[in-house]
Amino acid sequence: MKKDLYIVTGSSEGLGKALVENLLSDPRALVIGVSRSAQISSDRFTPIELDLADTEALIQRMADFFPLGDFGSVTLINNAGWIGEISPLGDLSELGILKVHLINHVAPSILVNGFVRQYGELPARKSVINISSGAANKAVDGWSGYCSSKAALNQLSLVAQAESDLKGYGIRYVALSPGIVDTPMQAEIRSASEDNFSQLAKFRTFKDENQLSTPADAAAKIIFLLANLESMPGVLHDIRSF
């Protein structure tokens, strides 16, 4: 039986960790997890310790991300993301502006490029899930970097799908908004200053009133999406619609 290969970024906590745990419940799954810190222990899990904001290191380790093999399917899940500095333009650090785009858009772009280069001609089921955000379509004060980088990720996904269709690669792309998930990013948002983020009270209410979905629930829906891509046409999707 052929193995299914998954490459998951941001795999050490939150949604990424839940995705890896869910995927590894299938004995056919081989998972490569990318994170800055501790990883899951399994003989079918390969950790890559890397800060995705370090573009030079990412490029140097590209061969580790995309091994060759007789796989039944190959899937890249660009899950890692950063909210960025929560402050209005004018108060942001230049390096903070750079970092949020490196993590949320540049690194996924490099990884998609590598995925296509390695697997474009592979006769297997191929898919790329880019974890986006509803913020990609909204103007949220204090989130200029996050909103704009996720909008860029959506556009990358749309262009990649158009190219896949033109070239006959057979790669399916989805830019997926996961909803509001109880992750460390949400805790970071709730710790912001109201002077820098006018919607602070609303996000604290999400937590106080148990309106956040769990990483495990969100991961299960993403796995469901992967198993049912043929019945969900289009590139831009919201997890709350299924």
Image (cartoon, rainbow, N blue to C red):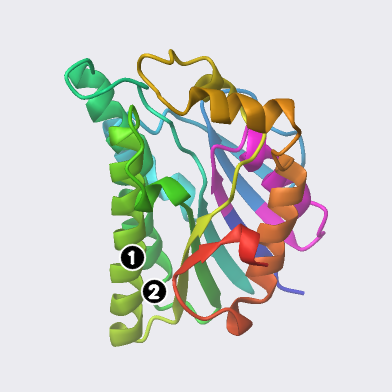
Was residue 22 drawn as part of the magenta stretch in this picture?
yes
Residue at 35 percent of width and 84 percent of height: 165
Q: Which residues are magenta?
A: 7-30
Q: Give x and y (percent) for residue 234.
A: 46, 77
Q: Secondary structure at mark 1?
A: helix
Residue at 49 percent of width and 39 percent of height: 80
Where is residue 166, by image quadrant?
bottom left
Is residue 167 shown above or below 238?
below
Amino acid identity at mark 2: Gly
Was residue 148 drawn as part of the magenta stretch in this picture?
no
Q: Mark 1, residues whose alpha carbon is within 10 Å: few (<14), some, or many (≥20)? A: few
Amino acid identity at mark 1: Arg
Task: Name the residue carrying label 1.
Answer: 117
Residue at 36 percent of width and 14 percent of height: 195
Visible residue check, residue 118:
yes
Distance, label 2 to label 1, CA atoms, is: 6 Å
- Label 1 near label 2: C-beta < 8 Å? yes
> In the picture provided, is 77 more to the left or to the right than 103?
right
Nearer-the-camera pick, 84 or 113: 84
Q: Give x and y (percent) for residue 190.
A: 55, 20
Instruction: Find residue 82 and name its label.
Output: none
Quadrant of image for the C terminus: bottom right
Task: Name the residue carrying label 2.
Answer: 120
